[in-house]
Image (cartoon, rainbow, N blue to C red):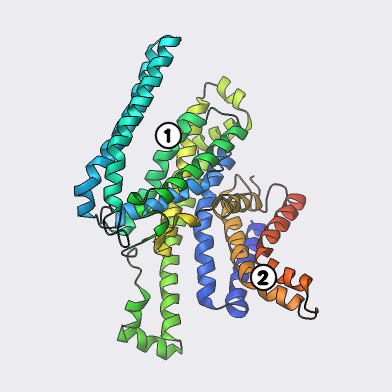
């Protein structure tokens, strides 16, 4: 217990020193909120890997689905788009889904042979042509409606706070579909499959403008209750008087208050996830999951349905990642599919779990806070440090190369830290008991 307290106190000291000496409190709170959201994602990955040994490299895809849920829930519907092409789009998608379901049904009922192959080909080709015939004109019509502002069907126009659980549900639904097809694969093939599916999810979000404007980006209409906009605070006489009495600049103070409010809401979600995770881990269900992780054959011999349990934990972990993705999008106030990169939304989350200690929820939290801080602080301080290192060097190609390489210092830092942890604490800073 003392080791845990010392490690968390050390991470807290890093954030305090950052606010006092390295950057502003506004920037420090930005880093902290980023780290807290990343910690929720790390807890989701820890459920899948630490509890059940499932190697999911598709974290990016589930986070992107959480962000997409924010748009689908919060943005008001574009009534003209629904009138012109909404029925065609969803009718085409329904035909595509029905084609796949009918093909599976026919293949299951027909004996192997040439007839089954011909029937499968006919169903798939015919269904695909019918799908494109209905779907393409509807998409073209929707995307032509005021494309500089909308060009999409919009969402439900509901409060954005409802999008957080909706993000978890959307990610869970996708995890169910992926799990039903990919969980029977060996661990390395499962990693390849989840990575490929995550890339497909992001590619669809980039290219299907009718859904969420694609790479044109989608601005959100509101913030979660009770998070105000900075402009609203700056127009409040009471807030201006309070900021002046404390000697703060109103612009900076409003930004700090907004980030503090977000932080409190994120902490509520994070605390709830940790509480549920700890109860699940210490329950008979959690012990069963660890037994399956350690020896699938022995667990199967004891009558446990390993595939079903793997599907359960895969869905739960993906739902947690989806909730974190929704929180991140609502906090940013914009959905940009181009920002979903494997380095940020898969590799970095896995580093958090490995450094913190897989199988330990508090280890995942510690890793999220530590790596989240390091990821952003090195980006901010890298050019400054490199400038100090090269200050005494004569101008030339070497100095220019070193200065240009400063932006990659955080990748070097991540790699060095990961090597140090794996060398001196292979099971993480807070290993599983």
Secondary element type, mark 1: helix
Query: What is the number of the mark on residue 177?
Result: 1
Q: Is residue 159 left or right of residue 413?
A: left
* Front residue (pair 204, 328): 204
| Residue 274 visible (yes or no) | yes
Q: Is residue 162 left or right of residue 336?
A: left
* Front residue (pair 223, 19): 223
388 lies above or below 429: below
> What residue lies at 33% left-to-right and 36% top-to-bottom?
132
Q: Is residue 421 left or right of residue 249?
A: right
> What residue lies at 42% left-to-right and 75% top-to-bottom?
257
Q: To which residue does mark 2 refer?
A: 382
Residue 101: quarter of image: top left
271 lies above or below 237: above
**Real-space CA distance between mark 2 and mark 1, rounded to the nearest whole angstrom:** 42 Å
Mark 1 crowd level (few <14, some 14–19, many ≥20, 10 Å Cα): few
* Front residue (pair 73, 196): 196
Q: Is residue 389 left or right of residue 334?
A: right
Residue 340 place in picture, x, y as percent: 50, 54
């Amino acid at each position: 217990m003392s080791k845990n307290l010392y490690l968390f106190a050390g991470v807290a000291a890093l954030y305090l020193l950052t606010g006092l000496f390295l950057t502003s409190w506004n920037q420090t709170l930005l880093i902290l909120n980023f780290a807290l959201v990343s910690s929720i994602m790390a807890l989701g990955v820890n459920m899948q890997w630490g509890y059940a040994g499932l190697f999911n490299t598709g974290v990016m895809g589930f986070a992107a689905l959480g962000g997409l849920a924010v748009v689908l829930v919060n943005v008001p519907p574009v009534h003209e788009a629904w009138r012109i092409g909404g029925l065609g789009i969803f009718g085409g998608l329904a035909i595509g889904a029905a084609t796949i379901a009918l093909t599976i049904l026919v293949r299951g009922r027909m004996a192997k042979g040439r007839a089954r192959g011909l029937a499968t080909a006919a169903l798939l080709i015919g269904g695909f042509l019918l799908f494109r015939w209905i779907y393409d004109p509807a998409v073209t019509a929707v995307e032509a409606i005021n494309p500089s502002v909308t060009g999409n069907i919009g969402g439900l126009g509901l409060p954005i706070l409802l999008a957080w659980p909706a993000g978890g549900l959307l990610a869970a639904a996708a995890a169910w579909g992926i799990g039903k097809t990919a969980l029977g694969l060996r661990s390395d093939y499962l990693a390849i499959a989840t990575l490929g599916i995550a890339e497909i999810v992001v590619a669809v979000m980039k290219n299907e403008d009718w859904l969420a404007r694609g790479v044109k980006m989608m601005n959100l209409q509101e913030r979660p209750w009770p998070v105000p906009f900075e402009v609203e605070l700056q127009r409040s006489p009471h807030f201006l008087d309070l900021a002046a009495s404390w000697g703060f600049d109103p612009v900076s103070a409003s930004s700090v208050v907004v980030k503090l409010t977000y932080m409190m809401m994120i902490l509520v979600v994070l605390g709830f996830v940790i509480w549920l995770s700890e109860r699940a881990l210490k329950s008979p269900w959690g012990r069963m999951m660890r037994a399956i992780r350690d020896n699938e054959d022995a667990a199967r011999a004891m009558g446990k349905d390993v595939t079903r349990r793997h599907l359960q934990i895969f869905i739960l972990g993906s739902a947690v990642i989806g909730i974190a993705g929704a929180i991140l999008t609502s906090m940013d106030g914009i959905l940009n599919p181009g920002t979903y990169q494997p380095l940020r939304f898969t590799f970095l989350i896995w580093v958090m779990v490995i450094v913190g200690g897989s199988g330990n929820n508090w280890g995942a939290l510690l890793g999220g806070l530590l790596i989240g801080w390091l990821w952003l602080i090195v980006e901010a301080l890298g050019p400054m440090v490199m400038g100090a290192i090269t200050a005494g060097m004569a101008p030339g190609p070497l100095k220019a190369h070193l200065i240009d390489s400063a932006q990659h210092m955080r990748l070097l830092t991540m790699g060095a830290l990961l090597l140090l942890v794996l060398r001196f604490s292979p099971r993480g800073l807070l290993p599983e008991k």
